[in-house]
């Protein structure tokens, strides 16, 4: 991967950046995504935010090497603290857990006033990210799932609007993704078949475990999730 040719995963994220946006890429590591977006003239300006010194230095080096210091500012800081209110209209957060993405958005809520689009790529627990969007007035407008190097990635795109609009069956669709259920792609089926196998294994362990209120509750929850996913896959 380089700033001319992104990984399939980051390319899918880049495809949702509206042309002309002022972008913040949070957790930017090598700043590949903002460098690519500026070089391809998708955006005129970006902030690349990084909280860890090593990746922050890598991002600075990359931006300097590309000669993009005028268009991309690399800032060190936690989550959305690297952006000023009103500065940014599109945020990308990719390659982290869904809970971390949700906590970055929650902690930086006051910076989201001018932001029109969020493009989020949780590596795990996309449900936690969907729940945050739902609770905070962000409407999921698109989702994508793809497989690269034996890993399956989900991309969630949201804009301010009616957060309940894409949902018909909240519990099921928060877990699996309302758009992804409709698409029922090969990667989606693979992801959830693997998850089902995992859950079945845990369920067997729980069935052999000593009876307690906790194991009963866990079994019940797992059975519900297994049923929900089986219904979708058998559709
Ligand atoms: N976004 C790039 C991508 O998708 O390829 C890099 C992903 S890398 C796995 C995650 C990056 O997020 C790391 O460089 C990490 O230091 C950074 N990160 C984690 N938590 C962060 C936070 N709260 N604020 C800013 N950056 C964070």
Image (cartoon, rainbow, N blue to C red):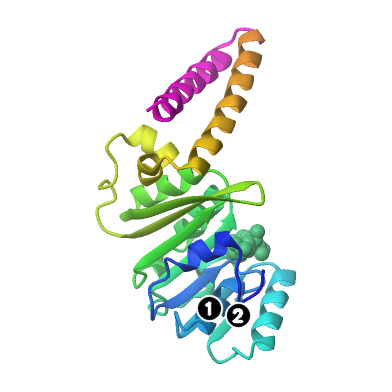
Q: CA distance from mark 1 to mark 2?
A: 6 Å
Q: Is residue 195 above or below residue 18?
A: above
Q: Is residue 199 above or below residue 71?
A: above
The answer to whether the residues at label 1 and label 2 have Cβ atoms under 8 Å apart is yes
Judge left or right: residue 39 versus residue 57.
Answer: left
Residue 229 lies within the magenta run: yes
Crowd band around label 1 with a 10 angstrom C-alpha radius: few (<14), some (14–19), many (20+): many
Q: Nearer the viewer, residue 29 or 181?
A: 181
Measured from the top left, where is residue 16 in percent x and y?
42, 66
Residue shown at 55% from the left, 92% from the top: 70
Crowd band around label 2 with a 10 angstrom C-alpha radius: few (<14), some (14–19), many (20+): many
The quadrant where residue 181 appears: top left
Q: Which residue is mark 2?
A: 74
Measured from the top left, where is residue 97 in percent x and y?
58, 50
Magenta range: 209-235
**Mark 1: which secondary structure?**
strand
Residue shown at 51% from the left, 82% from the top: 38
Measured from the top left, where is residue 119 in percent x and y?
44, 62
Which label sits on residue 47? Answer: 1
Judge left or right: residue 80 versus residue 139.
Answer: right
* Picture quarter with the N terminus: bottom right
Measured from the top left, where is residue 23 in percent x and y?
46, 75
Q: Nearer the viewer, residue 87 or 107?
A: 87
**Mark 2: which secondary structure?**
strand
Question: How many numbered marks are there?
Answer: 2
* Picture quarter with the C terminus: top left
Q: Main secondary structure of the magenta part?
A: helix
Judge left or right: residue 202 versus residue 140.
Answer: right
């Amino acid at each position: 991967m380089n700033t001319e040719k992104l990984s399939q995963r980051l390319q899918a994220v880049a495809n949702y950046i509206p042309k002309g946006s002022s972008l913040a890429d949070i957790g930017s590591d090598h700043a590949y995504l903002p460098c690519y977006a500026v070089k391809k003239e998708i955006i005129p300006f970006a902030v690349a935010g990084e909280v860890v010194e090593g990746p922050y230095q890598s991002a600075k080096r990359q931006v300097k090497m590309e000669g993009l210091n005028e268009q991309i500012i690399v800032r060190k800081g936690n989550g959305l603290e690297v952006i000023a209110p009103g500065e940014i209209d599109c945020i990308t957060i990719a390659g982290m857990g869904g809970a971390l993405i949700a906590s970055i958005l929650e902690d930086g809520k006051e910076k989201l006033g001018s932001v029109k689009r969020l493009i989020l790529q949780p590596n795990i627990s996309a449900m936690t990210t969907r729940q945050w969007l739902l609770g905070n007035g962000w409407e999921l407008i698109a989702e994508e799932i793809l497989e690269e190097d034996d890993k399956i990635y989900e991309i969630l795109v949201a804009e301010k609007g009616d957060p309940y609009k894409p949902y018909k069956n909240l519990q099921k669709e928060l877990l699996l993704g309302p758009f992804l259920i409709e698409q029922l792609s090969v990667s989606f089926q693979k992801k959830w078949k693997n998850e089902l196998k995992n859950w079945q294994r845990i369920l067997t362990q729980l069935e052999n475990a000593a009876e307690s209120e906790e194991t009963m509750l866990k079994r019940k929850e797992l059975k519900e999730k297994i049923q929900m996913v089986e219904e979708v896959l058998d559709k």
